[in-house]
Image: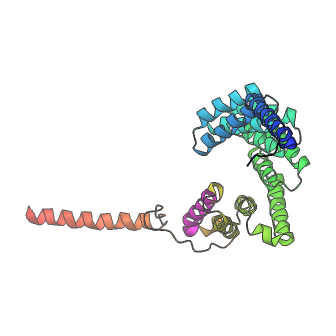
Amino acid sequence: MQLLPDPGGGRFRALLLATLAVSFILLQVCADNPTEVAMTLSKRADDFVAQERYMEAIDLYNEALALDPYSSATWNRLGRAEMSVGRYPDAVAAFQKSLDLDPYNSAAWRNKGDALYAQGEYGAAIDAFDRALAVNANDLYALLQKGVCLQMMGRTAQAMDTYNEVIRLAEREVRRNPNEAKYDATLWTNKADALTKLGRYHEAVEAYQNAIAINPKYERAVTGIEHVNETLFRARGSPELLNTPILPVETTPGEMPVPVSILSVPFAVGILAVLSCLACQRRRKCG
């Protein structure tokens, strides 16, 4: 049987081939696009950061920025990697590059504040945290760190007011969005940190526990509750050191040194004196 010619088939095949050719060209262009390559390098650097291979991440971020120096996000990530290896001036410079490109990047303002704080530049750090708060007035971390800077500068009353404001905003957020608060470990940790600074340790423990229940690997919450538990443990013999009642804290044997009671020293001296007298009497009898 002879097939009849298909007048439309040739045009369809030609259109299909043309489409494939254009797609191939576009793929080639995208593959050679510096921005696309920079994004790929930045993602690889993110993987190195997750593995705590910070120097390798820094090299890749710099390669990415050499191709695309206009990425605010990449400059911010480079700054965080620089902070992780203690290169705080370089971190500040990277965060500033990020902010030059995007002055509304509140995360970069926070990070710049942290890097300045690490160098003891508390006034400049406060300015950075204030800029983050200007972008987001409910940025509890920026507010908390501002309080820490104020405290380091000896402005204790202002610091205490700032910590109380962190707690107030955190509690308001819990009331407004109770369902979201159940999954926000950062919210509870910021509140717990502020409570710790105010000496409200038993409330801080509860807030840290909420954070850890949400994210058991959240380092700031884990470190915070360890610090509070140790403070409570050491204060058992001196409750006047705390501003609030001490809750019992369970600890495993050998986890922390047992505090020495005030009466234990003279008691021990007395025991040693008695033992010494007995030894002398024995030597006399033997002699």
Please provide percent x and percent y for residue 37: 72, 32
- Given residues 115 and 256, the one toward you in this image is 115
In which quarter of the view is residue 90 placed? top right
Which image quadrant: the C terminus? bottom left
Rendered view: 136 above or below 86:
below
Q: What stretch is highlighted in magenta?
A: 222-237
- Residue extending farthest to the front is 1
Please provide percent x and percent y for residue 137: 89, 53
- Given residues 156 and 226, the one toward you in this image is 226
Q: Give the left or right position of residue 124, taking residue 185 as reference.
A: right
Residue under the image location 78 percent in, 32 percent down: 21
Residue under the image location 86 percent in, 32 percent down: 100
Residue under the image location 70 percent in, 61 percent down: 196
Rendered view: 37 above or below 105:
above
**Main SS, magenta residues:** helix
Please provide percent x and percent y for residue 232: 59, 66
Rendered view: 129 above or below 274:
above
Residue under the image location 81 percent in, 69 percent down: 174
Tell me if I can see residue 122 in this picture: no
- Given residues 40 and 22, the one toward you in this image is 22
In which quarter of the view is residue 140 placed? bottom right
Tell me if I can see residue 111 in this picture: yes
Please provide percent x and percent y for residue 104: 89, 42
In which quarter of the view is residue 236 placed? bottom right
